[in-house]
């Protein structure tokens, strides 16, 4: 067993556990958007960032992927951590204005609106990648993937046309933390 | 240069049939055909065992791959820092005015495709433009005009 | 593929031992007449773009035409980049060392007539000292070169990179032979550790320490271990690695083979960006020739050590310069970085221990092995040993490639070697470290150029790009430029970078348009900190640096934009006005004809006027006017012929 400290409290963890698993096991709150036990973690939403160590040299690490090590000091709610979370949420409110899940989490961090312009009022997809990961890792079909890069990155099918590789199992819709996949599922399989 | 002398399978069979060679195959197809035809994607997936969604993800991630046929001439304007300071954006704006299409697009007559590129490493000659494989140093709007006219006449 | 024009039947020369390598070197040197004539024509990408192949052709024709019954025809040697790019095309006539600059095809006859036949210099082609106006005969007397220490670049400009015999004659592979016959792999690692070499790609991580951790990883996980060259030089304005790969490919290769020997690797990879086709060609050619000679591949120099390497071409993604993205690209996938919680030395390519180093880092290794760690550690300053190659670009007289010992000051590089800003004004700022770096103002020109000192002033060394800016470059514009670049290059995986960079850039757009408030600046700083802290990789993590440093050193300029609605440098289109100076305008009408808006009017031979209401500030008139009559004034003025008459909006 490994001993680490979270927010000043010493807790035990098994070798191989991540900081997130350990924290949740002991009842500490760490928000996540792109994490799900059914698939491998990818560390893309950055909501789960925690501070490792103290002082100006301390760095922020994604707890969903960071392995525990003896003696490490974790802080789940420092100013730096809160700053990252509230900006992520404010940007997500502008990027995915139609998602109530995002608005709820944003409210928890006192983000009730956004200074940024809203380009697509119906959008809900935050590119957490859970849908693509479940289709590849669990269903084993890889019918969908992320397409393009940067601000143009989106979830899509080959040549953005309906694909017969999709068997309409619905896993992607189930794992999607918002309603985004539901809204685009017809474009994946096609409408019969 | 674009040459359709080789069939797609002749190109893909240069490499071992493994996912590791996906990008090699795409690069060779891109070089020969000027873009990646859908049939080429299908064959590459068949040969390497890479799922179509993954191959499409790769083809759309990297800037050098095109999925639609390109113009006869590709015009690349360097927008590296030195070229930016010396007015490279002015050349892009002028191209947009003259060709009437957005960067990355091809003119309706399929003559020209233009795009900005990242630094080509010829900074003493800023601003730099590359047409097909030919470098044009210290490019000005007037020099651009001349080149476009010369190429249009061909 | 081996270059057909210079390929020899190298197979018959396959070297079976280090003695044979020495013999080969001796025989090559013996076959050359050190007093023999030779014409060197620079064929680096810059000079090629400027027409050096035509110069070489013209020289060839002139040599053919000259009557040379009594003497042997000199060869024309095509070399890599000499570094003095603003003076190209460059030609050197040996053995006299006459250094000719800005050579055109029409100069070929004079060069042959005077320098080859009469052994005299062509005066008008010589470089003239900018202070005294005196012509300078040879390269080593030219201030640009005199103040440098060209050790990594020592062969470039002297050897033909497509001919391995040139490299061997210059001492290439001597270090490899020494290591394979008289050093253990452990001793090679120690030498690199003691030299103090730090990664030249940007992060400055001690190379010896990286190799040492890799060996520890191999202890834990076993082999294979891979060695990889990072040739994805993506920082705009940086062309150090391009020059080394094009001009001295064997330096990189030899370094890689030495590293492979030290670490016990059998397979290596060279990841080179696709935008460097000449570098790729030269590396492929170099590897083919090295294989034929038995310097690469199975049983190198008959020592039992085998190692080979393959080139992976980039496909157009700046992010692939990041180590985890580079590995995933070699594996055939999209270049999305991974969080580096387990170091690449332990889990890199295909999850195996991997050592990735930059081109320039690898090129330093043969020097360290050959001349020893103590020699290397004697260069530079404490903790920052050796030399560094920089690409000096932008508003500087001598744009080109320079190599200096670490610790030299910024001012010395920009003013003494670079010749300062054209026009003589002090530089405004120098941007180091590319999109990840920061702007350092003139007031800090005495800052030593080394990893630690540059970090202390808020910037970083980066890969070596040094962009000099003058009073007509706007810091708001340059910050926006770098953000825009990274916005396009972001892989898009993590939220802070994918969503943050574009929003930061849009905030800079509003400042550039003269809008925004001081509170917006504070918000930008706060968002910058979130992006810095929150991004998955260093692309996003370092993206705020240009904004943060320009705010630190040039806040007044930001305030001028948002509070005074003017761009002091005359760049931001919404905050400037174009005028024609009636005292200088000759009424030639060229600008009016070029104007895309048709908003310049005037009678023939009478001063012309720009209609500010329709002017889009594209700058075409400024570019076309031969009389310097077009002026850019900071601020938004309403209709008036000249600032004296015009009224500010």
Image (tube, grey):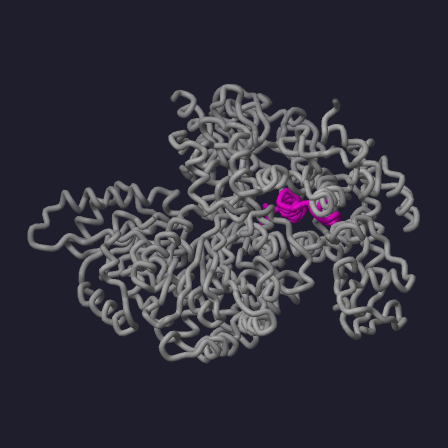
Span colored in magenta: C470-498
Indicate left or right for C241 with C204 as reference: left
Q: Is residue C583 visible?
A: no
Vertical placement of residue C626 versus C96, above or below: above
Majority SS type along the magenta span: helix
Residue C312 place in picture, x, y as percent:
48, 51
Residue C642 place in picture, x, y as percent:
62, 32
For the C terminus of chain C, the quadrant is top right
Residue C339 place in picture, x, y as percent:
69, 57
Residue C367 place in picture, x, y as percent:
41, 71
Indicate left or right for C557 with C233 as reference: right
Residue situated in front as seen by the camera: A114 or C630: A114
C121 inside magenta stretch: no
Residue situated in front as seen by the camera: A137 or B119: A137
Vertical placement of residue C642 versus C460, above or below: above
Indicate left or right for B12 with C328 as reference: left
In this view, the residue farthest toward the left is C70
Tally the marks. Answer: 0
C478 inside magenta stretch: yes
Q: Is residue C165 visible?
A: yes
Residue situated in front as seen by the camera: C509 or B154: B154
Q: Residue at x 55, y 46 (%)?
A: B19
Vertical placement of residue C472 versus A11, above or below: above
Vertical placement of residue C103 versus C305, above or below: above
């Amino acid at each position: 067993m490994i001993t680490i400290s979270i927010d000043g409290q010493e807790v035990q963890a098994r070798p191989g556990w991540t900081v997130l698993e350990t924290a949740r096991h002991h009842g500490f709150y760490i928000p996540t958007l792109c994490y799900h036990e059914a698939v491998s973690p990818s560390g893309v939403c950055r909501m789960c960032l925690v501070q490792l160590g103290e002082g100006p040299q301390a760095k922020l690490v994604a707890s969903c992927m960071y392995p525990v090590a003896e003696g490490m000091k974790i802080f789940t709610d420092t100013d730096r951590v809160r700053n990252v979370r509230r900006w992520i949420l404010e940007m997500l409110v502008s990027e995915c204005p139609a998602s109530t899940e995002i608005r709820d989490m944003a409210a928890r961090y006192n983000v009730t609106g956004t200074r940024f312009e809203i380009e697509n009022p119906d959008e809900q997809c935050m590119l957490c990648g859970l849908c693509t990961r479940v289709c590849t890792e669990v269903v084993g079909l890889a019918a969908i993937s992320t397409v393009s890069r940067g601000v143009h990155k989106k979830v899509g099918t080959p040549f953005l046309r309906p694909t017969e590789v999709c068997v309409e199992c619905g896993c992607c819709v189930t794992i999607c933390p918002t309603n985004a996949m539901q809204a685009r599922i017809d474009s994946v399989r096609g409408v019969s | 240069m674009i040459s359709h002398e080789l069939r797609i399978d002749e190109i893909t069979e240069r490499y071992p049939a493994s996912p590791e060679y996906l990008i090699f195959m795409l690069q060779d197809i891109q070089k020969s055909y000027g873009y990646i035809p859908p049939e080429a994607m299908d064959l590459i997936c068949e040969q390497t065992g890479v799922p179509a969604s993954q191959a499409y993800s790769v083809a759309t991630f990297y800037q050098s791959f095109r999925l639609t046929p390109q113009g006869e001439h590709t015009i690349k304007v360097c927008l590296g820092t030195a070229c930016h300071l010396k007015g490279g954006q002015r050349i892009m704006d002028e191209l947009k005015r003259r060709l009437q299409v957005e960067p990355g697009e091809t003119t309706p007559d399929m003559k020209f495709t233009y795009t900005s590129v990242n630094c080509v490493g010829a900074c003493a000659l800023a601003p730099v433009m590359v047409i097909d494989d030919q470098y044009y140093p210290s490019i000005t709007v007037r020099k651009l005009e001349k080149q476009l006219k010369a190429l249009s006449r061909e | 593929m081996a270059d057909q024009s210079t390929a020899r039947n190298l197979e018959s020369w396959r070297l079976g031992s280090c003695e044979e390598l020495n013999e080969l070197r001796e025989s090559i040197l013996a076959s050359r007449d050190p007093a023999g004539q030779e014409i060197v024509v620079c064929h680096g990408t810059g000079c090629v773009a400027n027409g050096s192949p035509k110069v070489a052709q013209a020289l060839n024709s002139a040599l053919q035409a000259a009557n040379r019954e009594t003497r042997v025809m000199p060869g024309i040697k095509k070399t890599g980049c000499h570094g003095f790019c603003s003076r190209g095309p460059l030609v050197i006539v040996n053995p006299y060392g006459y250094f000719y600059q800005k050579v055109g095809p029409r100069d070929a006859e004079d060069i042959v007539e005077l320098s080859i036949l009469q052994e005299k210099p062509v005066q008008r082609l010589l470089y003239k000292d900018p202070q005294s106006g005196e012509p300078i005969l040879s390269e080593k007397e030219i201030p640009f070169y005199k103040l440098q220490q060209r050790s990594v670049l020592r062969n470039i400009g002297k050897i033909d990179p497509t001919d391995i015999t040139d490299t061997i004659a210059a001492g290439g592979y001597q270090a490899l032979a020494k290591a394979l016959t008289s050093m253990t792999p452990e001793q090679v690692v120690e030498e690199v550790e003691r030299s103090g070499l730090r990664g030249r790609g940007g992060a400055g991580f001690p190379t010896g320490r990286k190799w040492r951790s890799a060996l520890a990883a191999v202890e834990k996980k076993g082999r294979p271990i891979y060695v990889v060259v990072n040739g994805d030089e993506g920082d705009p304005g940086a062309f150090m690695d391009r020059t080394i790969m094009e001009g001295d490919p064997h330096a990189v290769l030899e370094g890689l083979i030495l590293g492979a020997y030290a670490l016990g690797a059998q397979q290596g990879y060279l990841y080179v960006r696709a935008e460097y086709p000449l570098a790729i060609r030269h590396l492929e050619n170099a590897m083919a020739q090295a294989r034929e000679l038995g310097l690469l591949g199975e049983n190198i120099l008959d020592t039992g050590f085998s190692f080979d390497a393959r080139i992976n071409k980039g496909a157009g993604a700046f992010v692939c310069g990041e180590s985890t993205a580079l590995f995933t690209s070699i594996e055939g996938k999209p270049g999305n970085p991974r969080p580096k919680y387990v170091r690449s030395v332990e889990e890199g390519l295909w999850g195996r221990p991997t050592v990735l180093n930059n081109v320039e880092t690898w090129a330093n290794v043969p020097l360290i092995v050959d001349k020893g760690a103590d020699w290397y550690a004697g260069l530079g300053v404490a903790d920052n040993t050796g030399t560094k190659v920089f690409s000096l670009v932008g508003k500087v007289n001598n744009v080109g490639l320079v190599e200096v010992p670490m610790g030299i000051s910024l001012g010395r590089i920009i003013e003494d070697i670079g010749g300062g800003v054209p026009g003589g004004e002090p530089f405004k700022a120098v941007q180091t470290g590319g999109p990840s770096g920061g702007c350092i103002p003139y007031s800090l020109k005495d800052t030593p150029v080394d990893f630690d000192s540059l970090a202390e002033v808020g910037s970083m060394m980066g890969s070596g790009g040094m962009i000099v800016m003058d009073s007509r470059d706007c810091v708001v514009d340059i910050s926006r430029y770098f953000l825009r670049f990274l916005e396009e290059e972001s892989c898009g995986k993590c939220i802070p970078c994918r969503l943050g960079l574009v929003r930061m850039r849009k905030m800079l757009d509003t400042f550039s348009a003269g809008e925004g408030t001081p509170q917006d600046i504070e918000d930008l700083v706060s968002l910058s900190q979130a992006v810095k802290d929150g991004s998955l990789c260093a692309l996003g993590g370092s993206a705020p640096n240009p904004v943060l440093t320009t705010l630190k050193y040039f806040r007044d300029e930001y305030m001028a934009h948002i509070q005074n609605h003017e761009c002091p440098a005359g760049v931001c289109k919404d905050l400037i006005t174009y005028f024609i100076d009636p005292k200088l305008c000759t009424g030639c009408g060229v600008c009016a004809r070029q104007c895309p808006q048709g908003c310049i009017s005037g009678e023939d031979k009478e001063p012309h006027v720009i209609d500010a209401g329709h002017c889009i500030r594209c700058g075409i008139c400024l570019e076309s006017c031969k009389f310097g009559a077009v002026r850019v004034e900071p601020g938004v003025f309403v209709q008036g012929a000249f600032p004296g008459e015009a009224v500010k909006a």
